[in-house]
Image (cartoon, rainbow, N blue to C red):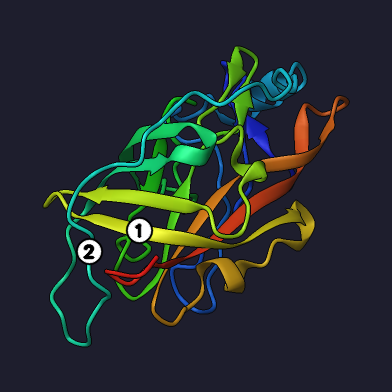
C-alpha cells in the first residue's frame, strides 16, 4: 500500500514502515476501524483532504521539572514506561498512548490528532535503542499534535516523562524529510547505539489530487546524559 491515508474524519496518516524483525517491514495504515469498513471508506475520505492552516505562534509550554533519567546501563532492568511528551520550543505537551500493530500487521495510528503515541514494539524512551513516537500533522479541522514538528532544529530539547516520574531528556540531532517511496526504514526503526528517539509525522508537499502528503518528517534525537547541558 502506497501513499498516506486518512480516517473518515480526515486525519492524515503516514505510511511509516516499521521493523519487527530485521527482515520484516509493515506500513502505518488506518487502525481502529471496523472490519470491512476499510479501503472504500478510506479512499473516499482521502479525496477530500486539505492541508491545515499556516503555522502560527506556538503555545507557551514550560520546560518540565523532575529528576532526569540516567543513561542506560548494560544489563539494567527495563526502564519505566513513557506517559507524556513535552517539546517546549514547538508548544507540544501531550499524554502518550500506546501504539501496537493491527491484525494486518500495520502500526496503529493515534485515534485522535490531539495526542501522540509510543510504538510498543520499539524500546522505551531512555532505554538502549531507538524509541519511536508517532503523531498526526493535521486534519480538516486544523493542526495536529505534530503540526510544528518540521520546525524543530538541532539542539532542541525533547522531554519524555515516565511512569516513575523521571524525565528522559533528548537533544535533537537532525530533522529530515523523506519521500514516502524512499522512507529509510532501517535508519529509523533499526538497531541504534545508546538511547535514541525518533519522532515521525507526515510532511512535505500536499497533493490536492489525492489528499495525501508526499513525505514523512522524521526527527532524530539522542539522550542527554544527566548533568550535561
Residue drawn 33% across the image and 76% down it: 128
Residue 23 in view, yes or no? yes
Q: Residue furthest top?
A: 141
Residue in the foreground of this view, choosing between 172 and 42: 172
The x and y percentages for residue 226 are 27, 69
Residue 126's disc is none
Where 174 sits versus 82, above or below?
A: below
Query: Toward the viewer: 103 or 100?
Result: 100
Q: Which residue in the protein does label 2 denote?
A: 69
Residue located 41% across and 31% down the image: 61
For the C terminus, the image quarter is: bottom left
How many neighbours does mark 1 have within 10 angstroms: few (below 14), some (14-19), or many (20 or more)? many
State yes or no: discs 1 and 2 in contact (Cβ < 8 Å): yes
The residue sitting at 70% across, 26% down in the picture is: 43
The tag on residue 169 is 1
Residue 203 horizontal/vertical position (percent): 71, 41
**Would you call the spot at circle 2 few (<14 residues within 10 Å), some (14-19), or many (20 or more)?**
many
Amino acid at each position: 500500500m502506497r501513499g498516506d491515508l486518512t480516517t473518515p474524519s480526515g486525519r492524515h496518516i503516514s505510511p511509516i514502515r516499521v521493523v519487527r524483525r530485521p527482515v520484516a517491514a509493515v506500513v502505518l495504515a488506518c487502525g481502529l476501524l471496523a472490519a470491512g469498513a476499510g479501503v472504500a471508506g478510506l479512499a473516499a475520505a482521502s479525496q477530500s483532504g486539505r492541508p491545515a492552516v499556516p503555522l502560527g505562534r506556538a503555545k507557551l509550554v514550560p520546560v518540565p521539572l523532575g529528576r532526569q533519567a540516567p543513561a542506560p546501563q548494560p544489563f539494567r532492568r527495563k526502564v519505566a514506561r513513557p506517559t507524556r511528551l513535552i517539546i517546549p520550543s514547538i508548544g507540544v505537551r501531550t499524554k502518550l498512548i500506546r501504539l501496537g500493530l493491527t491484525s494486518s500487521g500495520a502500526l496503529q495510528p493515534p485515534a485522535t490528532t490531539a495526542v501522540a503515541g509510543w510504538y510498543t514494539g520499539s524500546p522505551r524512551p531512555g532505554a538502549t535503542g531507538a524509541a519511536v513516537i508517532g503523531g498526526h500533522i493535521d486534519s480538516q479541522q486544523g493542526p495536529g499534535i505534530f503540526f510544528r514538528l518540521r520546525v524543530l532544529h538541532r539542539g532542541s530539547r525533547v522531554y519524555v516523562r515516565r511512569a516513575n516520574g523521571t524525565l528522559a531528556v533528548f537533544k535533537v540531532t537532525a530533522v529530515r524529510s523523506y519521500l514516502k517511496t524512499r522512507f529509510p526504514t532501517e535508519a529509523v526503526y533499526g538497531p541504534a547505539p545508546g538511547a535514541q528517539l525518533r519522532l515521525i509525522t507526515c510532511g512535505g508537499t500536499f497533493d490536492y489530487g489525492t489528499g495525501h502528503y508526499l513525505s514523512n518528517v522524521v526527527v532524530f534525537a539522542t539522550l542527554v546524559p544527566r548533568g550535561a547541558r
